Each structure stands twice: as C-alpha cells, then as structure tokens.
Amino acid sequence: MTATATEAPVLEVEDLEVDFISGDKVTYVLEGVSLEVRRGEAIGIVGESGSGKSVLARTILGIRPRGTVVDIRGAVRVSGKDQLAASDGEIRSRAGSLASMIYQDPMRSLNPTVRVWKQIVEAVTNRRRVPAKDAQAHAVDLLRQVGVPDPEARAMAYPGEFSGGMLQRVGIAAAIAAHPDVLLADEPTTALDVTVQRRVLDLLEQVRAESGMGLVLVTHDLGLLADRTDRTVVMYAGRVMETGPTSIVASTPAHPYTKGLLAAIPRLTGPVQRELPAIGGSLPPLSAPRAGCPFAARCPVAQDRCATQRPPAVAVADGHTAHCWAVADEQEATK
C-alpha cells in the first residue's frame, strides 16, 4: 500500500443517502454509506447485484439517472471538492481529471461512429484547446501505455474493430487520459474471459502504481479483489456490511454476509464440492427504508432485534469493522 494514514483522503464519502423518486414511488438505494480512499490506494467494493455499488460509483462521479428525480444527502468530496454541491457545468469540467470511470461494457460508453483517438482524449480536449496533431499523439501514447499493439494504426480505428479485451484497454486509456485523482472501475472484467481478466487487472494495478491515483474496483466477485486491493468494502442492499484490509476480510470475515460470499467462491484446493453453498433468499425490497439489518431475513445467525434495530459499527480489529449484532455480542463477550 503506497498511501499513508496521515495523508488526506483523495475520496471521501460520508453518510451518503440516495433515493430515486418516480411519481409517488421512492426507491431507497443507498443508506448511510461512508468510505474513503487515499492517494495511491486501491479499495474494492463488493456485493451482489442490487447492493448499490454502481449507483455509489456514479454518484461519486456526479452522474444522475435520466428521467428520475434523485434525492441525495450526505457528502462526497474528491480532492477536497464537493461533488454533490457542484453544478452540472462544474461536474462536466471536472470529468476525467478529478474522477474518471471504466465501465463494464466499453462498447456502450464509446461512440461507434467516432475514431478511437478522438474519444480517448475527449476528457482533455473538452476543457482546453489542443491541436489535433498533439491530441492524436497523446492518444497513441496512451494506447501504447495500455498495451494496444500498433497504436498508431489502432488509434485511427473505430470501436467495432476491437476485440472485447482490446476495447477494455481503450476504455482504460480514455479514463486515464486526463490523469484523474480517482479511477473507478465498475465491473471492468465481467464480459471478458479469465485470461483477459487477469491482463486487464494487471494493467489497472500498473496504472495505479505509476500514477499514484486512488483506485476503486467495483465487483460482485470477492475473490477478484485478493492481491488487487488494499481494503475491501462489502455492501448489501445499499448499506456497508463490513470493511477492512482485503487480506483480513478474505481470510477471517466477520459479517455473515461476507462469509456467505466467500463460501460461494469455487476452490482450487481441498475437497471437491459438487454444489457450491448459496445464500438463500433474495435482497429486501428497496421501496421502503430497511429497518434493522437488511440481511436479517437471509442470515443464519439472525436474532429478533436484527429485524428491527440497526446494528452498530463494531471494531473487530484495527481498521476492520462489521455492522452486525452477532459480532457485537462476540466482541462484548471477549471483554
């Protein structure tokens, strides 16, 4: 880990609440989410679909869903700048430099009718005038950095002429073009085969190490974060369930939900499992604020109060926290 505890966080999220409002219907997407990232640090945000991971990433960037009224409370600061109070113009001017994102499906975020080099440097050319020759040279250099072969020729190609793995590299080149302070990667390897996944993740690690930016890796696969991130934040139904050093969360998880996620990961060693354990049930409806712990209905160690009383943040160890009544009881018993 290259960051130190004395450095100011490059990303701060404090008690973030996000509600989507459509007519008289309210969807409570995020509830009291807090996290921070320091310069040069990599954190993972993990949870199943519907946990709020992508909404959190987009809120950090200042992206709002179209056609939906969004009520946001709390605080989001990138390099000290308030993202929630910023105007649309300020958000556009900051795009790519304060925070940038690599999307799950780069084809959907790239214009198929525009040459790749123009899209790669868009975050730079949108803010200041850059001679076309210089902008194209910058795009070629970025393609070279991310390992795209024959970058001079590939810069002139269109997105449809790239394979999935190469297209994701184009997305990474575009995301780092303006040297962002924080890079968010939203399920960047989901559509790729295992070999290409490893290459893309290795590339993200290389870019982070060389640039010193903060990296937020969003995924549903907890196993993907091992040896890739300094810390992990486990989310469920719009809340943080557990957070701590990735090595600790992966080896000695405290929250029952994290334990369930880990149990569902296929193992290369040990007894052969014909069927992987699954977490029974489904996410609670987001049409009302979650009372108590949102995982209570699926939790194997749930108590009566879990359904009605919001669990406290329990310090399991230095830097390792779980929001769970059972963990709170365990900690109290050891005092």
Image: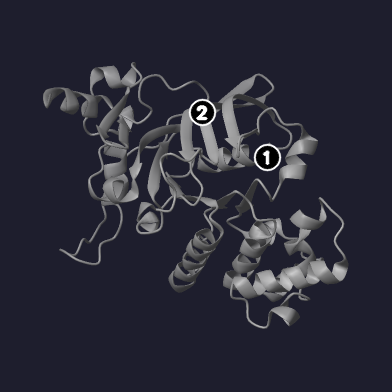
In the displayed structure, does residue 100 sit left or right of residue 197? right
Separation of disc 1 and disc 2 at Cα? 18 Å
The spot of residue 81 in percent (x, y) is 65, 34
> Considering only vertical position in the picture, is 89 above or below 131?
above
The spot of residue 74 in percent (x, y) is 56, 24
> Considering only vertical position in the picture, is 235 above or below 108?
above
Q: Residue at x 16, y 28 (%)?
A: 330
> Considering only vertical position in the picture, is 156 above or below 300?
below
Q: Residue at x 66, y 30 (%)?
A: 84
**Nearer to me, 203 or 40:** 40
Q: Which residue is mark 1?
A: 63
Kindly identify which numbered label has been placed on residue 307: none
The spot of residue 103 in percent (x, y) is 61, 55
The spot of residue 183 in percent (x, y) is 58, 51
Q: Residue furthest front?
A: 6
Q: Secondary structure at mark 1?
A: loop
Q: Tell me which corner region of the image, top left, top right, bottom left or bottom right, holds residue 280.
A: top left
Q: Tell me which corner region of the image, top left, top right, bottom left or bottom right, holds residue 329.
A: top left
Q: Which residue is mark 2?
A: 14
